[in-house]
Image (cartoon, grey):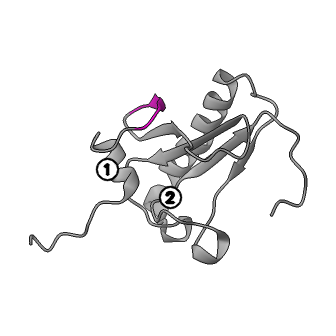
């Protein structure tokens, strides 16, 4: 064994080791269709930089986090929901996070109630 930590599911998708429906990619992030969608449009926006949870971000990640927010809007617009979508970040297992590589859920295409969950 090399002693290196195992790759997350998303790192394997980035490396093209696991197939996924990629709808967007640039040098900092990529977006895939969720395999268990909760709405007609359910896309996961994932930074290429491994970061387990949002609370693990450091000041140097500020530009990356801003890039994710602006990219989410571009993706929602491309999907036809530029003015009506929800972004969700689950931070930690108790909040519903199941893959410990930061990702934003872009959800649209049906009425979304408040409060969620």
**Residue identifier under label 1:** 12
Please, is residue 82 above or below residue 55 in the view? above
- Position of the C terminus, as image quadrant, is bottom right
Q: Nearer the viewer, residue 24 or 40?
A: 40
> For the point 50% across and 38% down, which residue is it?
32
Specify the farthest residue to the front.
36
Q: Is residue 52 magenta?
A: no
Residue 21 part of the magenta-drawn span: yes
Marks 2/1: CA–CA distance: 14 Å
Using residue 73 as the reference point, say whether residue 101 is left or right of it: left
**Mark 2 = which residue?**
102
Q: Quadrant of the N terminus?
A: bottom left
Q: Residue at x 55, y 64 (%)?
A: 54
In depth, the one of 58 and 46 nearer the eye is 46
> Few, some or many C-alpha atoms within 10 Å of disc 1 (few <14, some 14-19, many ≥20)?
few
The disc label shown at residue 51, or none: none
Give the foreground label among 2 and 1: 1
In the rendered view, does 91 fall on the left or right side of 61?
A: right
Q: Secondary structure at mark 1?
A: helix
Residue 114 appears left or right of 85: right
Q: Earlier in the sequence, mark 2 or mark 1?
A: 1
**Foreground of the two, 13 or 63:** 13
The correct choice, above or below, for 112 with respect to 26 in the image is: below
Q: Residues within 10 Å of mark 2 (few under 14, many from 20)?
A: many
Identify the residue at image location x=61%, y=30%: 75
The part of the chain drawn in magenta is: 20-26
Determine which quarter of the picture holds residue 107.
Answer: top right
Expressed as whole percent of the image width and height from the top left, the position of residue 110 reads 83, 37
Percent of width and height locating residue 17: 27, 44
Is 19 left, or right, of 61 in this rendering? left
The secondary structure type at the circle numbered 2 is loop
Residue 30 image-quadrant placement: top left
């Amino acid at each position: 064994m090399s002693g290196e930590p195992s790759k997350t599911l998303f790192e394997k998708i980035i490396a093209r080791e696991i197939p996924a429906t990629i709808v967007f990619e640039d040098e900092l992030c990529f977006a895939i269709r969720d395999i268990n969608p909760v709405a007609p449009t359910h896309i996961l926006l994932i930074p290429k930089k491994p970061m387990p949870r949002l609370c693990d971000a450091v000041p140097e990640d500020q530009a990356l986090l801003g890039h994710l927010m602006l990219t989410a809007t571009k993706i929602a617009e491309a999907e036809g929901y530029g003015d009506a979508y929800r972004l969700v970040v689950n931070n930690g297992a108790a909040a519903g996070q199941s893959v410990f590589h930061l990702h934003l859920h872009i959800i649209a295409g049906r009425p979304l109630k408040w409060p969620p969950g």
